[in-house]
Image: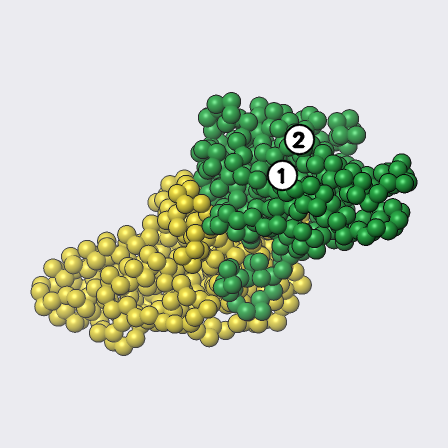
Chain colours: A green, B yellow
Amino acid sequence: MKNFTTLQWKGDIDGCLELTDQRKLPAQFITIQCKTPEQLFDAIKTLAVRGAPAIGVAAAFGICLAAQQLDKSKLSDAVRRIEQQADFLSKSRPTAVNLFWALERMKKTAHDFAAENPGAAIDDLRQCLLTEARKIYAQDVQMCHNIGINGEEFVPVGGSVLTHCNAGALATAGDGTALAPIFEAQRKGKKFKVYVDETRPLLQGARLTAWELQQAGIDTTLICDNMAGALMKDGKINAVFVGADRIAANGDAANKIGTYSISVLAKEHKIPFYVAAPSSTFDLKLQNGSQIPIEQRPAEEIACFMNVQIAPPNVNVYNPAFDVTPAENITAIITEKGVIRCPTEEKIRQIIV
Amino acid sequence: MKNFTTLQWKGDIDGCLELTDQRKLPAQFITIQCKTPEQLFDAIKTLAVRGAPAIGVAAAFGICLAAQQLDKSKLSDAVRRIEQQADFLSKSRPTAVNLFWALERMKKTAHDFAAENPGAAIDDLRQCLLTEARKIYAQDVQMCHNIGINGEEFVPVGGSVLTHCNAGALATAGDGTALAPIFEAQRKGKKFKVYVDETRPLLQGARLTAWELQQAGIDTTLICDNMAGALMKDGKINAVFVGADRIAANGDAANKIGTYSISVLAKEHKIPFYVAAPSSTFDLKLQNGSQIPIEQRPAEEIACFMNVQIAPPNVNVYNPAFDVTPAENITAIITEKGVIRCPTEEKIRQIIV
């Protein structure tokens, strides 16, 4: 289904990470190459690569870039340097937990390797880290596939689904999270429509999701975010599919700003509301969504468009990148390990841990 | 308070209608002059002048422009020509009833004048029509003032209000409808904040409302439409003020797309939701909101921004300009004649008729 590459490691331990530059889509389809952790940090921060799972995979390869900078020092010093660079990369964005999850896994890989192979060469450590990053990549592809299989039954035959932001192939190494059930339903020959919220301020819906769905030949209609309620009232939406950037132990889910409003509108209109996310999106240390840090982004993202000022100069702007949807507004969380209906901490721990 | 002119008749019966071109704000503050009904038609259709009350006032002056084109024919022919031109202007936009209300009033003025003054000259008819249009203008200014007085008590001291689209001075001849209570509260020295929805696709909130409030020295914060729910959940909104383009007999109110969603979010968070509109906005012939025609606007308004394509080419777009908020979601309708709490047909008829 996917006819482009969101991110790809090119070469061996001395390779680099190639990314589709999502800031330019759909007007331009260009790739950029990250050769240092600093370049990758900027790519994540400025959204050249975005989407919680894709950020996690990219960060794992970021540790491979960090490993290239290690000199021929002691293995223990090398591990300490890897940990420093993981801490650096972890500061690129605050909300998506997959970033921290992937970096923790890479740190542990380096640590375990050094402990088990005290006499190994730095190149052996590099190889071990690249193997682990590739495993994370492959698992992400498989995760998307399984979410698609697990969520496909919720795509209503002959109906319409709404999605917000981009939780598609561009947000992952594979087919996406929220869009995976939609792509799977398409593969099975189901007929349905998708309404896509444009997703202000950065228009990931208009630029990325509408493009992905159109590429796949799916019947796609673009709307402004403020139109979803009117569509629901008119009976035009039968299900909502969104992704998540972090899910607390009780099922509260942080996702792109605007997701919470949609969940309230779906509840009002008795429309099922599905969150599709891998198990790596859960942060079971957090009791509930109030503990999820919400990234605040620059005012210019709202006040300017393509360098043109669209609001009066110096107006105050509030620009949170995410909001939190409470578990009680979520019909089910679709993961690669199974579907969690009416999510509670107990049900989540049964599936995820 | 108002330090600019939304629309203004320049000169006498051979004058013209000067408009602030709202398509250019806030980057450019320029005025345009409409000298024919056709020019005014285009100005209304392309939103150089917008806002239900302002459209009504502009259309009344449009009849004065039509009267300038009358030759020295019989008075009855002149009245028929005025009626034709009123029908033409009525097709400029379909939803706001103030347009039809003002045109009906001008047609009746022409008709009554001809019936009562069968031997009068065409210039006398022109003078009579200009006098009536000026009366509609003056009544609009007074209407705004009275809505401000009637609604000011609902602006929460030390709190924050949310508004959507522009129902301010730029939408009327006076201080506005939804913004009138806010300007009045400011005059009374109340301290409060206003959150402004940017209002996609045409950004009337970002371009017009934020600008108006900033000019008035009011504490203003711009947000994207999809952020309102998260703000409400965080306890940051204490009241919602919006305008209306048409209100049915039962209190169902059509307003800018996105208003319905806000009303559901306000209900969910137990936040009062006020609609401020003049009595000319009521269409008591319509039993409920399902009978209000909703204008569909061009796809390019969403898919392009300043001539730059922001969505994939040929993507389907759904672009309704308005939605309908059911009466049960409205805490009160604030009119120039009084406040209608928990609106019902009976209460509306008591105040409006």
**Residue B145 coordinates in the image, percent (x, y):** 47, 67
The residue closer to the viewer here, B198 or B3, is: B198
Q: Residue furthest left?
A: B73
The residue closer to the viewer here, B211 or B181, is: B211
**Residue A199 coordinates in the image, percent (x, y):** 54, 47
Q: Chain of mark 2?
A: A
Image quadrant where residue A179 sits: top right
Q: Which residue is mark 2?
A: A143
Between disc 1 and disc 2, whose residue precedes?
A: 2
Q: Do we see residue B200 in this rendering?
A: yes
Q: Is disc 1 in contact with disc 2, using a CB cutoff of under 8 Å? A: yes
Secondary structure type for disc 2: helix
Give the residue displayed 28% in from the left and 63% down from the top.
Answer: B40
The residue closer to the viewer here, A234 or A15, is: A15
Q: Amino acid at mark 1?
A: Thr
Q: For residue A172, which numbered disc appears in the image?
A: 1
Q: Do we see residue A321 in this rendering?
A: no
Identify whether A295 is placed above or below B6.
above
Q: Amino acid at mark 2?
A: Met
Q: Residues within 10 Å of mark 1 (few under 14, many from 20)?
A: many
State the CA–CA distance, disc 1 to disc 2.
10 Å
Give the residue displayed 14% in from the left and 69% down from the top.
Answer: B122
**Residue A156 coordinates in the image, percent (x, y):** 52, 26
Secondary structure type for disc 1: loop
**Residue A285 coordinates in the image, percent (x, y):** 81, 40
Q: Relative to residue B347, is residue A126 drawn left or right?
A: right
